[in-house]
Image: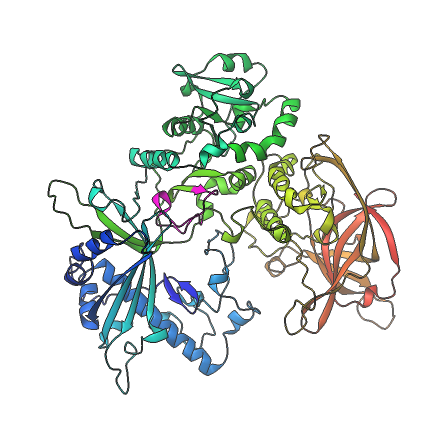
């Protein structure tokens, strides 16, 4: 990646002039690379470096015309340097032009009131069907797309610029950075103009000091022979058949090297689930009670996967006896067959699979086992994550057709060896592109989210290849994680939220991040809404120190009630389509768990925490929670399903008429689902009613038709737009006598409607 102004940018491609590109580009590095850079002396220096040396450097010089010639001849490494130079010069000119005009394109400014750099975000995960967000500080908007009011001409004017046609002498410094495992895992390249600077320097000669080009690569080795290079770089493979022997060998080695795994292989750990699959019952398998296991030193593996709709080989009352006797691997769905293969290969005897270790037709057994999910995944020696499998019948050790994307395409450097009889070993430099979560089906399912979050260690079989996680010892990328940011980007959201381990003061922020991502995922049965996140809630509850109430926390209940189901998705996105509430009871209407869709959460920003204009919440208008009583479906399981929830609150109430938007294109692009209106009280007005505010609805409600009177409960006075205070809160309709039901979240323009309104105490169910 290209380091620029504290951010990391994809290098802009230096386009080779079509008239000068050679017909048959060479595949190996150019003579400059082989004689000045990637020489036997360099590799000897790296091999001789002390393990205490965290960084080893090498410097060489090259003229711009030499670099250009190598690029035209097809040298991969020189091409990455050219891309970095091209991108740096482009970004410098872009910023200079904007500093002169002292303005931003309106299309950027309107979307970015607060400008933030890419370094403050998670590693740029792209999402299918999501709106692009322009980020000014990282200039990413100019990489591919165009902006109508861009005064600079943007990237289009730079696509074909022959940047290296200028004359310049470059000094190139390579720094090999050693990771905790002892391997050199990253390479930093610095390209700087050398020699005396001319009175009127060209754009290349200005690349010195803080304007030098800085590039960041991951480094690893591949090939069948690595003995000469063992210990220098991590070994990796790009074999797209996930179950290939070379992948399995690496997984086996990864597991065997875990000292920390021994700590989890205890009698208590293996007895966390009631049942396990014994993989060493002769040549067959069988279900065993974990309480009967005495050889716990090898632990058990857990499987995280997508069920799909075709799984019929499950543990039932009528099949229990036969499954406890024995059954064959071939009887299992392919995904579970593959999990058996992996478990055996890494040397573990026992496997936990929900379909075969929980009685699927026994509510009593589910009531006992589902509350153990947190302990099961935390106690497992390793979790096998079938990321690429769409269902239990598909499997995950097959060939993956997806193309692996890179910001810096892989560059292969042959490692010099004296042996002529062995196959060539290559050093590989690259920087992978962002993880695209929609390419791994497991990321669309709700149950699998907590399974990954809670796993102490995991092996992920992804479209990106085989990836590993060890939360007991986070470290730089090595082994299977080489070529990727360490332990990232396996999750589709911020790396800072990757682990549930956090300080107590940050627990709510972690919970909101988890809840937001979880609510985007799908459930086959909406009744599992609270169950499928219960293990994470229980884990965070240990630090939260607060009672859990149907997906909310008592300590922050007044704020947590102010969630909403926004319409900021494209209308083609399934999360933008309002759905009916579940037929059976899932959660009280005041809980986000009652909604089938992606919710957003209210994070309190007071005036003193806001920006210079005083943006943020001004006051809560007397809103307060009086009491909250939740009835649990399973007594004692506070984090599981509920059968009722009664909330008593005090606040200011106003009535409005609900006017839903039409279904035309104009209204489909609005952020609300309808307007709040009131009849005009003076005769001279030409309009019968005025629009007082707007609202988003939580679900498709048969009782929420146009013209219906809704009750709005004010929960906060907030300045969303400089100079204007709005009232926001819960939109309600009557449920039973003296009780209400939440149906949406509203915003009324200005506080006038609620001024002078007395506080009332009401009940919401």
Q: Is residue 514 magenta?
A: no
Q: Is residue 99 left or right of residue 72?
A: right
- What secondary structure is the magenta-colored segment mainly? loop
**Residue at the image point whose x is 18% and y is 64% from the top:** 70
Q: Is residue 285 left or right of residue 184?
A: right
Residue at (35, 50) in percent of width and height: 483
Q: Is residue 138 left or right of 169 when viewed as pictured?
A: right
Vertical order, 705 against 79 (above or below) = above
Say whether residue 484 is magenta: yes
Q: Position of residue 601 (x, y in %)?
A: 65, 53
Q: Nearer the viewer, residue 737 or 528?
A: 528
Q: Nearer the viewer, residue 406 or 40?
A: 40
Left or right of 564 in this view: 112: left
The quadrant the C terminus occupies is top right
* Location of residue 465 with respect to 109 vertically, above or below: above
Q: Is residue 584 above or below residue 149?
A: above
Residue 209 image offset from top left, x and y in percent: 34, 75
User: Residue 249, percent across and down?
Assistant: 31, 34
User: Which region shows up in magenta?
Assistant: 469-489
> Can residue 547 be spotted in the picture?
yes
Q: Position of residue 145 (x, y in %)?
A: 42, 65
Q: Is residue 647 visible?
A: no
Q: With respect to residue 323, does 214 lie above or below?
A: below
């Amino acid at each position: 990646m290209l380091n620029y102004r504290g951010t990391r940018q994809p290098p802009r491609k230096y386009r080779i002039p079509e008239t000068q590109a050679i017909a048959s580009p060479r595949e190996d590095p150019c003579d400059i690379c082989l004689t000045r850079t990637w020489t036997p002396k360099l590799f000897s220096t790296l091999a001789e470096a002390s393990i205490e040396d965290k960084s080893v450097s090498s410097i060489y010089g090259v003229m711009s015309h030499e670099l250009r010639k190598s690029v035209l001849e097809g040298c991969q490494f020189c091409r990455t340097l050219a891309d970095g130079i091209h991108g740096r010069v482009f970004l410098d000119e872009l910023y200079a032009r904007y500093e002169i005009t002292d303005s931003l394109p309106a299309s950027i400014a309107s979307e970015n009131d607060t400008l933030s750099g890419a370094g403050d975000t998670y590693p740029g995960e792209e999402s299918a069907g999501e709106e692009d967000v322009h980020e000014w500080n990282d200039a990413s908007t100019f990489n591919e797309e165009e902006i109508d009011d861009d005064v600079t001409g943007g990237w289009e004017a730079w696509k074909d610029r022959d940047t290296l046609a200028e004359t310049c002498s470059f000094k190139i410094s390579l720094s090999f950075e050693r990771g905790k495992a002892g391997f050199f895992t990253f390479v930093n390249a610095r390209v700087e103009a050398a020699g005396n600077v001319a009175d009127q320097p060209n754009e290349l000669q200005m690349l010195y000091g803080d304007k030098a080009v800085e590039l960041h690569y991951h480094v690893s080795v591949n090939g069948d022979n690595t003995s000469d290079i063992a210990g220098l770089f991590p070994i990796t493979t790009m074999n797209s058949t996930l179950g290939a022997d070379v992948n399995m060998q690496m997984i086996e080695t990864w597991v065997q090297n875990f000292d920390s795994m021994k700590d989890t292989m205890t009698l208590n750990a293996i007895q966390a689930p009631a049942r396990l699959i014994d993989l060493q019952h002769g040549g067959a398998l069988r279900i065993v009670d974990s309480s009967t296991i005495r050889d716990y030193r090898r632990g058990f593996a857990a499987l995280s996967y997508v069920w799909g709709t075709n799984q019929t080989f499950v543990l039932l009352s009528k099949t229990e006896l036969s499954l406890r006797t024995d059954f064959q691997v071939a009887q299992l769905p392919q995904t579970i067959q593959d999990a058996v293969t992996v478990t055996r290969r890494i040397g573990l005897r026992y496997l936990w699979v929900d379909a075969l270790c929980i009685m699927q037709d026994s509510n009593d057994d589910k009531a006992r086992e589902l509350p153990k999910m947190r302990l099961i995944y935390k106690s497992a020696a390793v979790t096998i994550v079938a990321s690429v499998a769409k269902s239990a019948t598909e499997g995950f050790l097959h060939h993956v057709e997806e193309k692996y994307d890179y910001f810096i395409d892989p560059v292969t450097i042959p490692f010099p060896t004296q042996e002529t009889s062995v196959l060539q070993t290559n050093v590989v430099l690259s920087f992978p592109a962002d993880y695209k979560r929609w390419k791994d089906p497991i990321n669309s399912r709700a149950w699998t989210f907590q399974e990954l979050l809670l796993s102490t260690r995991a092996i992920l079989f992804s479209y990106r290849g085989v990836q590993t996680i060890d939360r007991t010892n986070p470290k730089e990328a090595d082994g299977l994680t080489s070529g990727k940011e360490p332990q990232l980007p396996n999750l589709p959201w911020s790396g800072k939220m990757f682990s549930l381990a956090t300080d107590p003061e940050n627990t709510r922020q972690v919970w909101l991040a988890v809840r937001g991502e979880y609510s985007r995922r799908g459930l086959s049965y909406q009744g599992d809404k609270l169950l499928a996140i219960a293990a994470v809630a229980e884990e965070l509850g240990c630090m939260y120190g607060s009672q859990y109430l149907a997906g909310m926390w008592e300590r922050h209940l007044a704020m947590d009630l102010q969630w909403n189901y926004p319409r900021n998705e494209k209308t083609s996105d399934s999360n933008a389509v309002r759905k009916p509430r579940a037929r059976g009871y899932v959660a009280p209407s005041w809980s986000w768990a009652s909604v089938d869709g992606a919710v957003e959460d209210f994070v309190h920003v007071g005036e003193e925490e806001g920006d210079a204009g005083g943006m943020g919440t001004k006051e809560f208008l007397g809103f307060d929670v009086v009491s909250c009583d939740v009835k649990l479906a399973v007594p004692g399981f506070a984090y599981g399903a509920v059968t009722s929830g009664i909330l008593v609150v005090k606040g200011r109430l106003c009535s409005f008429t609900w006017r839903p938007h039409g279904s035309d294109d104009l209204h489909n692009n609005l952020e609300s689902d309808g307007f709040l209106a009131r009849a005009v009280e003076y005769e001279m007005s030409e309009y019968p009613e005025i629009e007082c505010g707007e609202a988003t609805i939580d679900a498709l409600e048969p009782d929420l038709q146009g013209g219906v009177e809704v009750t709005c409960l004010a929960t906060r006075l907030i300045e969303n737009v400089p100079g204007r205070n709005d009232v926001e809160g819960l939109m309600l309709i009557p449920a039973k006598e003296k009780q209400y039901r939440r149906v949406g979240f509203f915003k009324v323009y200005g506080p006038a409607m609620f001024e002078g309104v007395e506080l009332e105490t009401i009940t919401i169910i």
